[in-house]
Image (cartoon, rainbow, N blue to C red):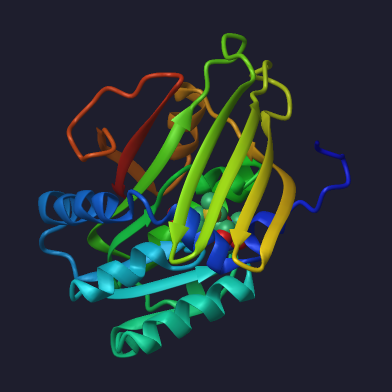
Amino acid sequence: MFEPNDQANALYEDPVVYDILHAPGTAEDVDALESIHTRFASGAPDTWLEPACGSGRYLRLAAKRGHRVIGFDLESSMIEYAAQRADRLGLADRSTFFVADMRTFAPYVKARSVGLAFNLINTIRHLESDDDLLRHFDQIASVLHPGGVYVVGLSLTLYGHEMPSEDVWEGARGRCKVSQFIHYTPPTDRDGDRLEQIYSHLTVSRPSGKTEIPSCYALRAYDEAQWRRAIDRSPLRVIETLDQSGHACRPEAPGYALWVLGRG
Ligand SMILES: C[S@@+](CC[C@H](N)C(=O)[O-])C[C@H]1O[C@@H](n2cnc3c(N)ncnc32)[C@H](O)[C@@H]1O
């Protein structure tokens, strides 16, 4: 089904398909972010920043709930879609979207102005080296208000113990149905390139017919020590670790947790 020359970023080229597929669970994640803002950054400005915001699904809902939002992404089609949706919903006055890279975005955001920054569902793992991650953390630290927090949703890896695995995700809007089959091949060596290889196959069904979109990409892996070491080298520090609903938890590998980071 998958060929080595499948387009790496085809997954992120169609914002409508991405938005439909990821809509389930969005409201619950925004509920958790609101509760984190209240608990850990109540004195910080009500300005939310999402690096690599994709279609803007989280920020759209946050703006509907009254928060000021800023989002950016490498893909211009994602940003055009996010800005258009905000405009149509009458949210343009409290929404800002622009094309930028997680490693170099800070000049476009006012220093120390962000109360809550967040980066969920392993998106930070698109940064493929410690240098890139540290550049990103530096940029976050410069735009974060001294009382603000950065919430990172990350799955930790247990090298040598994880088998290749598969998942299926589904979403629908009107008469358009999207399903995604994903195959994950985790890295086995904590000292190698640490890239988890991911193959995705999207099937988009509309009344006009079916479209198949294969793609492949890599996400950088971290065990807990590697992740904590990277944070220790940055201007940020760990305030708390939470489960997906925002309850305090001890992160497990393999497993997903929210890391609440603050300025050191
Ligand atoms: C899994 S999607 C997440 C989108 C959004 N955060 C969400 O949860 O719906 C990953 C996004 O990261 C973007 N991306 C990948 N590397 C990036 C980088 N270095 N800087 C900015 N955006 C990046 C992709 O274009 C894509 O939209």
Q: Residue at x 52, y 47 (%)?
A: 124
Give the farthest residue toward the top. Answer: 161
When the figure is inspected, residue 65 is found, relative to residue 203, above or below; the finding is below
Q: Identify which residue, 75 or 263, lies in the foreground.
A: 75
- Residue 102 seen anywhere in this rendered image of the structure: no
Residue at the image position 24 percent from the left and 61 percent from the top: 146
Considering only vertical position in the picture, is 89 above or below 133?
below
Classify residue 57 by image quadrant. Answer: bottom left
Taking the image as four quarters, which one is ligand 1 found in? bottom right
Res 130 → quadrant: top right
Viewport quadrant of the N terminus: top right
Does 204 sit above or below residue 128? Answer: below
x and y, in percent, of residue 250 in the image: 27, 22
**At 42% from the left edge and 59% from the top edge, which residue is drawn?**
140
Q: Nearer the viewer, residue 26 or 117?
A: 26
Of 192 and 242, nearer the camera is: 242
